[in-house]
């Protein structure tokens, strides 16, 4: 009579191995199954969701934590509605693509994503870019940022962001009616910049206003279309002294012309190679 024990033992080993394999495959599948969670967008421009592998019980990467792999969502505010996709590779600046609502490519390149062990997940900085290109809806290149320096151009207002070392330093825009072009320094939250410089222009390109918000002598000059002075304000807060003038009453002095020209040149220099778009995007 044939001994059945070796066969039974082999069958048990086989079943045990299959069970272990199924457990491993199940756990691996559980880990790989993408999970999503709302993530923060710096400056509050838009809503995004992050996708990660892991059970999500911890903030650290790993099986029980979150290993972030992708960010997707919508951007808004002054650039108009657009969608963004960011692939997370573990680098400081991650590859991204941004699209118009109708699907055309708006921009592509690398943008900063803060990915330290933060309980709320990664924080997307869509305007802190290192290498990026910006297009209008026809695919025409409007501007480029290379190694953190250049201009980010958005075909809506339209608006442009001068960028140095990956950070926005000033903002330039054209209003919908083409009435004025303005440019001002900003901080990373797009509030007034540390230097507080700003210039504005009439539709024909002539200087309309110049402001220096801080420094040894804060001031604001407003001009008429013929170039004569409309008003001059000096000082800050309650110490501000303002003088108003009639059309043609006062011209800029030679010293004032040099001062205003220096402010204008400092602000406008980064935008020399960037083009405004059509401003037709809603």
Image (cartoon, rainbow, N blue to C red):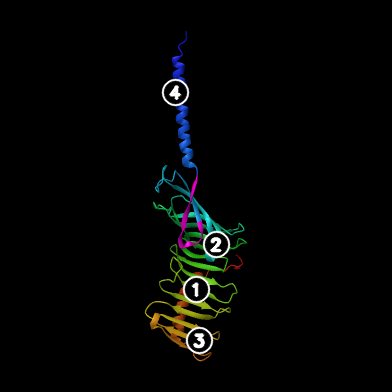
In the rendered view, would you say 5 is above or below 221?
above
The residue where tag 3 is placed is: 230
First-in-chain label (4 vs 1)? 4
Choose the circle earlier in sequence order: 2 or 4: 4
State the CA–CA distance, disc 2 to disc 1: 19 Å
Please report whichever mark, 2 or 1, sits nearer to the chain's N-terminal start: 2
> Residue 253, how many percent across, how many down?
46, 88
Region in magenta: 34-47
Residue corresponding to mark 1: 183
- Circle 2 crowding by C-alpha within 10 Å: few under 14, some 14–19, many from 20: many
Q: State which quadrant residue 185 falls in.
A: bottom left
The answer, for residue 21, to whether it is visible in the render is yes
Q: Helix, strand or loop at disc 4?
A: helix
Are the residues flagged by discs 3 and 1 in contact, CB closer than 8 Å?
Answer: no
**Element marked by disc 1:** strand
Mark 4 = which residue? 13
Pointers 2 and 1 in contact (C-beta within 8 Å): no
Camera-side residue of 188 and 256: 188
Labels 4 & 3 near each other (Cβ < 8 A): no
Q: Counting residues from the N terminus, which is met first, the one under dot 4 or under dot 3?
A: 4
* Residue at left offset 46%, top offset 37%: 27
> Alpha carbon of mark 3 to alpha carbon of mark 1: how far?
20 Å
Residue 200 vertical placement versus 139 (above, below):
below
Vertical arrangement, residue 81 with respect to residue 259, above or below:
above
- In the image as oriented, which residue stretches furthest toward the top? 1
For the residues carrying marks 3 and 1, which lies nearer the camera in this image?
3
| Disc number placed over residue 134 in the picture, else none | 2
Task: Kindly identify the residue that appears in the image at 52 percent across and 80 percent down.
Answer: 207
Task: Name the residue: 53% across, 66% down.
Answer: 78
Side of 240 relative to 45 (left or right)? left
Q: Is residue 125 magenta?
A: no
């Amino acid at each position: 009579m044939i001994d059945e024990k070796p066969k039974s033992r082999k069958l048990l080993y086989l079943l045990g191995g299959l069970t272990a394999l199924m457990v491993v495959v199940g756990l691996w599948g559980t880990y790989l199954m993408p999970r999503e969670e709302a993530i923060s967008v710096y400056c509050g421009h838009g809503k995004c969701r992050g996708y990660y592998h892991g059970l999500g019980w911890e903030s650290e990467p790993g099986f029980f934590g979150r290993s972030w792999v992708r960010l997707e969502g919508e951007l808004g505010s002054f650039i108009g509605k657009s969608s963004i996709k960011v692939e997370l590779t573990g680098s400081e600046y991650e590859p991204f693509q941004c699209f118009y609502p109708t699907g055309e490519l708006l921009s592509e390149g690398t943008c900063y994503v803060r990915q330290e062990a933060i309980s709320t997940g990664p924080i997307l900085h869509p305007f802190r870019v290192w290498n990026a290109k910006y297009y209008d809806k026809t695919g025409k290149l409007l501007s480029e940022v290379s190694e953190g320096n250049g201009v980010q151009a958005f075909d809506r207002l339209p608006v442009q962001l001068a960028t140095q070392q990956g950070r926005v330093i000033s903002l330039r825009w054209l209003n919908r009616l083409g009435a004025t072009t303005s440019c001002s320094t900003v901080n990373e939250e797009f509030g007034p910049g540390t230097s507080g410089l700003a210039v504005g222009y009439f539709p024909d390109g002539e200087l309309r206003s110049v402001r220096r918000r801080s420094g040894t002598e804060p001031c604001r000059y407003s001009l008429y279309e013929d170039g004569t002075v409309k008003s001059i304000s000096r000082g800050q807060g309650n110490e501000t002294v303002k003088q108003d003038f009639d059309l043609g009453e006062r011209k800029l002095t030679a010293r004032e012309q040099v001062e205003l020209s220096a402010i204008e040149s400092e602000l406008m220099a980064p935008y020399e190679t960037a083009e405004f778009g059509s401003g037709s995007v809603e």
